[in-house]
Image (tube, rainbow, N blue to C red):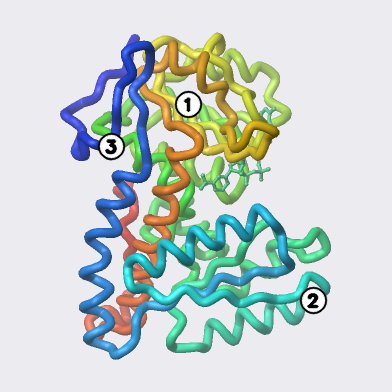
Amino acid sequence: MATQPSAAPSTAEVTDRRHDGARLLRGAPIAAEIRGRLSGEVSSFTERHGFPPTLAVVLIGADAPSAVYLHQIVRSCRSTGVTGRVVEIGARVTTAVVRRRIQELNRDPLVSGIIVQMPLPRRIPLRAVIEVIDPRKDIDGLQPENAGLLTLGYEGFLPATAQAAVEIVKRSGYRLEGLDATVVGRSNVVGRPASLLLQREHCTVTMCHRRTRDLAGHVARADLVVVAAGSPGLITGAMLKPGVIVVDVGINVVADGIVGDVHFDSARQVAEAITPVPGGVGPLTNAILLEHLIAAARAQHDDHHTSAPPRPPAARAP
Ligand code: NAD
């Protein structure tokens, strides 16, 4: 059964439909709308407090794909009046030094949000790094307290990419309630939180991973497929149910440029809607991170927020 939008898209310009295939769900127009709204919030915050919200991006070692992503974040910060501070730490640093630098940022009243650029060098355990981030500054929702809040269905900071993967579908006018959703990938950064968010939206969720026996079968049954595997062309049009909505989170650098995890040309012949790569989930992720940063800054500095937990615009409670 084809999945139809429940209402006219709230942001009609977000999408365009090609005559020969699926509707394209683009992230940039939604991101622009969010950034437009945030600019006003940033200037009134800056006026009230005499300093802008500041994001600290911790970069350990000079990893090329990370550096590209980092520049996008810093550009995105500047365009809304937020300060982006890059904290570069040499690749040969010890875990203890990384933890100390993060603790310094936790104590810095000017820094409202902290993200750690991934992947980390192999010898630095991710857990040892993320667990020291102050949960009130953990705007990418990776720290155990925020991950726990998400699991329990309470408000907290959500992982921005997972939130973007769900928001792009909702903001395009599709109703998620009751859909059979298959998520391919179960990382703590994308797949697992995306599956939890889809459950909050009342989807029936199947999670697939490298050891799943019948990936094709689970994908073929789904009304909504979210793919975050890091494997170019893993999902093809032949695997999809006609009328499915496809969210491709993958970012893979190949000889021809950047591609997702979905074979776009075949999938768009079958799907009702699909996010392109690049131009789908990625641009929205950065705007959502900024949204979280401003929520964190307000929670830390606005009087009426001082004793309250951060309240980013999270998905509805179950
Ligand atoms: P990861 O390597 O941590 O996790 C990949 C997951 O996919 C694992 O759970 C693994 O079991 C599963 N998987 C891999 N190959 C599979 C296969 N053949 N069949 C079934 N499952 C398979 O990766 P990640 O950090 O979750 O990132 C996933 C992708 O999303 C990457 O391409 C990454 O670049 C991209 N990403 C995009 C954004 C964005 O803003 N759009 C942000 C973060 C990550």
The amino acid on which the numbered mark 1 sits, given as a three-letter code, is Val
The amino acid on which the numbered mark 2 sits, given as a three-letter code, is Val
**Looking at the rendering, which quadrant does residue 309 occupy?**
bottom left
Q: Is mark 1 on a helix, strand or loop?
A: strand
Q: Which is nearer the N-term, disc 1 or disc 2? A: 2
Q: Residue 267 location in percent, x, y?
A: 49, 17
In this rendering, is residue 130 above or below 221? Answer: below
Q: Residue 245 location in percent, x, y?
A: 40, 24
What residue is pinned by disc 1? 225
Q: Which of 211 and 14 is in front in this view?
A: 14
Residue plotted at (54% across, 32% down): 227
Q: Which is nearer the N-term, disc 3 or disc 1? A: 3
Residue plotted at (59% across, 49% down): 188
**Beta carbon of the mark 3 residue lies under 8 A of ligand 1:** no
**Looking at the rendering, which quadrant does residue 120 occupy?**
bottom right
Mark in front: 3 vs 2 = 3
The amino acid on which the numbered mark 3 sits, given as a three-letter code, is Val
Residue plotted at (42% across, 76% down): 83
Q: Nearer the viewer, residue 296 or 47?
A: 47
Residue plotted at (50% across, 26% down): 182
Mark in front: 3 vs 1 = 3
Q: Which mark is residue 165?
A: none
What residue is pinned by disc 3? 14
What residue is pinned by disc 2? 93
Q: Quadrant of the N terminus?
A: top left
As measured in the structure, the alpha-carbon distance from the residue carrying label 3 to the one carrying label 2 is: 43 Å
Q: Nearer the viewer, residue 142 or 168?
A: 168
Q: Residue 180 location in percent, x, y?
A: 42, 23
In this rendering, is residue 150 above or below 55? Answer: above
In this rendering, is residue 153 above or below 277? Answer: below
Q: Is mark 2 on a helix, strand or loop?
A: loop
As measured in the structure, the alpha-carbon distance from the residue carrying label 1 to the one carrying label 2 is: 40 Å
